[in-house]
Every structure is written in C-alpha cells, then in structure tokens.
Image (cartoon, rainbow, N blue to C red):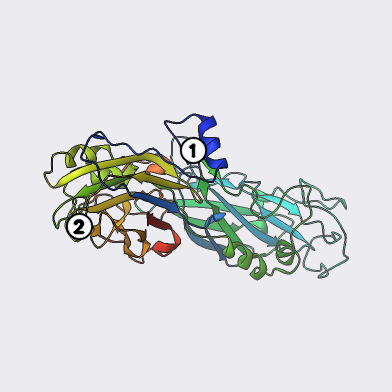
Amino acid sequence: MKKKYFSAALAAALLFAGFAFTACDDDDDNGAPGTKPTIKFENVVAKKNYVQSGTFAAAAPGATSQFTFYAAKGQRLMLVSKYSNSNDLFFAPANPGIALFNDQGVPNTGIVANAVKLWDNGTRVNEQPGPGVSHPGTPQTGVVTEVNGTDAAGHTYPAASDMFQVSLAYDVAQSLFTCTITNISNNTANSTPFSGGVFVVSNILDGELVMDKPFFSVDQKSSTELTQLAENSNVSPLQTLVASQTGIITTLAGAIVVVYTGDTNPIYTLNQKDAQLGLAALAQRGDPSPLKTSLEKVPQVRKIYTITETAEPGESLSCTYDAATNEKVAFATMFGYSNDWFFANGPALAALTKGDVTSKTVLLDDGTAISQYPGAGNAQYIFGGTVMPEDKPITAVGSTFPVPAVNELIKVTIY
C-alpha cells in the first residue's frame, strides 16, 4: 500500500498488528452523530509473473515465424527457441528480455539489433553443430552459459543475431506488438532450423518487473522445462509452466465513498455517459478529488469520503463513514491497470449494510478512454501514458480481455 500521510514507524506498527489501514479524508467531521460503519476494499488478485505468454512456430532456414502481444513502457519480451542442429543450445535474449520502449515511451520497432544470444543449456555434451548431431546425446551436469563465438568443446558459431533475427511492429491504439522471427542462418556456415518456442511479457508492480529472469539464470542449472525445449524441441512443459504463472493483475487506485439519500446513485448511471463531474479522474488515474468537489454541491449527498492511496495485490484500503438508517452508501475505486475502469456497487446499498458485499460489486468501463489490454497498455496511467479519449456510455467490462471475475480481484466488506 502506498501511504501518503503516515510515518514509516506507524505503518510498520499497523502491519505488524495485522491491520491494513488507509487514510479516509472527510472535510466535514461535525455532522450529526450516527452509526459509523467501516468499508474495506481488499485487493485479492493472485500475483502473476507474466501478463501474457504463448508459443510461436518453428522456422526453417530462410523462413519466418510471427506472434503478437500487448505491452507497455518498462515491460520486456523474453522468448526462447532451440538451435535445432545442436545437442542443447538455444536462442534467447539476455535477462530480463528485449526492451520494448525507450525511457520516453517510444516503441522499439524494426529489426532489433543484437536481440538474442546463443546459450548452452549445460545438460548435453556439445557435438559439432549440424544436421548429423545425435539426439539426445551424451549427458553432462553443467549450468547455463553464453556461447560467444565458441562453445566449451571449441566448436565455432556466428553471432546469434546473424542467425536469429527479431523485428517488431507496433499498433499504437491497441499497444499491440507484432514480433517477426526470421531464420537468417542460411547466410552463415551454421545453417540450422529453429524449433518452436515460448514467449512471455513480464508483469510490473511498483515500477519493477515481477519476474526479471523468466526462463533461466546464467551460471545456474537449467530447469526441467527449459531442458525439454533445449534438448528435444518440446515446448509443452515450458509453455504449461509459464501459462500457470500468467494473468492480469491490478492495483486498487484511490476510492470514494458517498453517503446519500434518494434513489439515484450519485457516482454513476449505468448505460449513460459519464456526467463529467469528475468520475473520469478516478477511473483514469485514481484521483477522487474532482468528483468529491462536484458531489459536495449535490443536495442528496450528505457525506463524502476519499482515499488517495493505492493497494497492490494482498493489500487493502478502508474507510469509516457516518451513516443513518434512511441513507444509502455508494463507492468506487479504480481498476488501476486500466485506461478508465472502476469498481462500484451495482445495486443500491443501505448505508448500514453489514457483511461481504462483493457479490454486489461490478467492474465498469467509464467510456471516456479507449481500453487497452489491462496491465499492458501504453496509454494507461500506471505506465505514465497519455489518455486516448472516447465518448461512450458507462458499461460493464466485457470479455474482450481475459479479466478475472470480480471476486477474484476485489473483496468489499462493510462492518
């Protein structure tokens, strides 16, 4: 949780005691006394190493293989493919993978110079590379090392990028890359097919890659899954492993809690356009203050509380509010890894409701910014992006992207 108002000592004490407490701002603490429920927003998303993963096809000398993926500033592409005319050599970038954007957020396109290196898996004795290499070959107990010109047995190789060429094209609106692998080994003395391969795009949390060594660590023993690919061109074990570590994650960024009377939710109206009272600021960048300022002028709104912190997976935001029996409560918090999505209560909630209200919580698209793949869109605020506006009604988030169910992302409790 990113705390703006508390000392590190106090934060540590609260965490030690088992509490996840977040400041809840209310400009008017002098209203009539009443029951004071607490609403808690828990980020329950399972932390995953990768936002996307997949496979690509084999490529004979002179042929190409292609795949697509979404990514944003700071994320890296890691891929791996077997040097087929070898015992256990493979092509892959150096950790943490290929940089996809520069520091200014400009995409890396065209042929990527020195995109990959050639690696020795360390599990088979290297023979002279060529179509006559025996498989699987003689076992050895070694570690993953770079092959830079010659291997441990003295066999020579061209530079990896003289055999394995990577080029990237980019679609700005979708934040979608197309990666083309070209087998140019036919221009060298070491012509070889490439096996099919596996790729991943690492998730980012708090500005850091969740996994910065996706497939291997230099000078360490190789995994069973990578060994199957490096020795036998079998992508399935590694594909299965990384698929289990792949998924959309998010933060909860900022929140607003509104106590009101009447029958109209003051925060939003489903299937109508954003009323331009400030909801877009919360949905796009986790800032509840513009909406708070607007709702202070609405007669039916009695109390407004805001939270300005961010909860990462496993963390929570909470707020205690003043309420009476004839009042309702509405809330909203940003799906932080989106362009303009937010969680909110769907049906109206009595302000004195108690218990788990996750089943009454929905994930909505504010309709004010073009949606991109969650956690991999370069226009998203989490990546310092610039909004690409759209003008559509507020709707439930659909199935365009593989977003987990609401109850796998957030738990909302009033107690």
Q: Position of residue 102 (x, y in %)?
A: 49, 38
Q: Residue at x 70, y 68 (%)?
A: 233
| Disc marking residue 102 | 1
Amino acid type, label 2: Pro
Report whether residue 171 is seen.
no
Please identify, in this view, whether the residue under mark 1 or under mark 2 is nearer the observer: 2
Vertical order, 302 against 349 (above or below): above
**CA neighbours of label 2 inside 10 A, class few (<14), some (14 to 19), many (20+):** some
Q: Nearer the viewer, residue 86 or 246?
A: 246
Residue at the left extreme of this rendering: 299
Q: Is residue 54 left or right of residue 71?
A: right
Q: Give me the disc on residue 393.
A: 2
Q: Earlier in the sequence, mark 1 or mark 2?
A: 1
**Mark 2: which secondary structure?**
loop
Residue at coordinates 57% horizontally, 65% vertically from top-left? 55
Q: Decide: few, some or many residues near mark 1? Use Cα within 10 Å; few <14, some 14-19, many ≥20.
A: few
SS type, badge 1? loop
Q: CA distance from mark 1 to mark 2?
A: 35 Å
